[in-house]
Image (tube, rainbow, N blue to C red):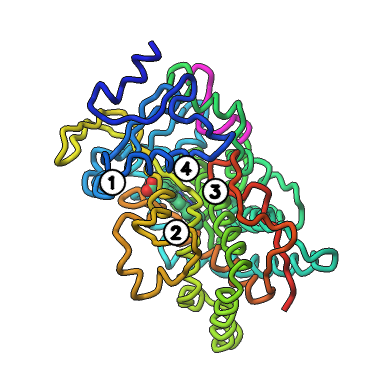
Amino acid sequence: WVNKKFSYWTDRGFMQGDRAFPLGSLGGVGTKMIIAEKYDYYYNKFKGKTPAVGLYHFLSPVLLVIDTELMKNILVRDFTSFHGRGLFINKEDNPIGVNTFTLSGQEWRDRRVKLTPIFTSGKMKMMFELLDVLGDKLVRILEDQLQYTHELEMRSWLQRFTIDTIGNVAFGIEPNALEHENSELAFYGKKMSNITFLGIVRFMIGSEWPSLAKKLKIGFTPKDVNDYFLKIFVETLERREKSQIKRNDFVSLLLGLKDDYTNEELAAEAFIIFFGGFETSSSLMTFLLYELALNPDIQDRLREEIMTGIEENDGILTYDILFGFKYLDMIVNEGLRKYPPIPTTMRKTNKEYPIPNTKLVIPEGVIIPVNSFSFQRDPEYFSDPEKFDPERFNEENIKKIKPFTNIPFGEGPRICLGMRFGLMQSKIGITKMIKSFVIQPSEKTQIPIKLNLGNPLLAPEKGMWLKFTKI
Ligand code: HEM
């Protein structure tokens, strides 16, 4: 029976990767490497031999994309055959898990169309002030820390910063995570990004046996995460409606969709804004600080740009000034290339798809991992890929980047909805810190950095210890 399962791809004429019961092609994931590194192993092994290689997530067939032309077809040109996300959802028992990120088909399209207007640059500008204030608070709190020590574990500080920003704008609450290490929001937020044995079992049941998963009331999130986020969002909605408070945040914008969606559906969107926004941006800032500490020339040039830009604007940082920092933009782009916070995105075929110019046909219902991590670290597309080199993204070089090889926010109709917000909060965080501190490696800095095997997003293994000195 297992052998039959493992011949799914060869029966259809595809090349396939290693397979063994029970993990399928995922041997070593979580113990020796993260899943993106395992995909990368297959990407390098099969590159040039086939446009896509068949793998197995446990016993389920998945197809890893290798060829950039095929990737373009999947993400953009022939998107109508690939609009699914391929995640298990359970509307009855886990309403929080049913949102723009996880939905497929018409339901996804309808949500996406309704939500897109709440992410425009005009709406982001409205939220800038709130983030600016929290950025200053981050600096104040780090300054306080320097009375006791100059070595700071920045991953957790940056998580605390993004919990405060997103808790504020998506749930209308003051998590005060920067003041209190163990805020409730942080507890439930982190629960989603720590892979546990139980989480793997739940994921496996959800993808292999959806009807059993429904009977077991399994969904995209654990039950307590569902209940917590539902509760805090509904409480905020009620408070807002009663008091008629108007604030420039996602809660107010979501409230504007009240005629179209139930409270549960709106809470699910607030949840994905929180989940999409807290770990990704803190991961990006963490790796950026690491590279800035290791590359003092780059750090100095960035500080010069920031200081001059703010000084010329009477000491005030605005949205337009922030997004006008060209070198900061190059640095952020290079950070996203080398350390994509979500290193793999997924699609699912909703109908059979013949791969152009081959005899291969991708069957319906197959999950397609697109591993941006591989393309963005492929020396064919980015020479000396381990080197942190913002010049890859200067005005001239950026034009030479091969399309679809740098996709940290995904691509096509399902591209990240919160890209502008993610960039805004990461750029604010970096700008405020670089303006106030010189950042250097410390004795505790892990060089070269290793990845945390228990996190589906890109995270450092042992946190990010860095030396901070007040300017
Ligand atoms: C540096 C920060 C971020 C990175 C690197 C990132 C990356 C991604 C990636 C790779 C995807 C999948 C795209 C695809 O499948 O083509 C995605 C989807 C998504 N992201 Fe982000 N993200 C970030 C920040 C945010 C923020 C701040 C929010 C919310 C405010 C957000 C909300 C979403 C949503 C709703 C989707 C689902 C889009 C859909 O399926 O239609 N993201 N993001």
**Residue at 78% across, 66% down:** 150
In the picture, the quarter occupied by the C terminus is: bottom right
Q: Are marks 2 and 3 in contact (CB under 8 Å)?
A: no
Is residue 74 toward the left or the right of residue 240 in the image? Answer: left
- Residue kind at label 1, given as amino acid type: Asp
Residue under label 2: 385
Within 10 angstroms of label 3, few (less than 14), some, or many (20 or more) residues?
A: many
Q: Is residue 419 visible?
A: yes
Return the disc, 1 or 4, that comes first in the chain's sequence: 4
Return the disc, 2 or 1, that comes first in the chain's sequence: 1
- Residue kind at label 2, given as amino acid type: Pro
Is residue 276 toward the left or the right of residue 445 in the image? Answer: left
For label 3, the SS is loop
| Residue 191 sits above or below residue 463 on the image | above
Q: Is residue 241 visible?
A: no
CA gap between label 2 and label 3 equals 17 Å
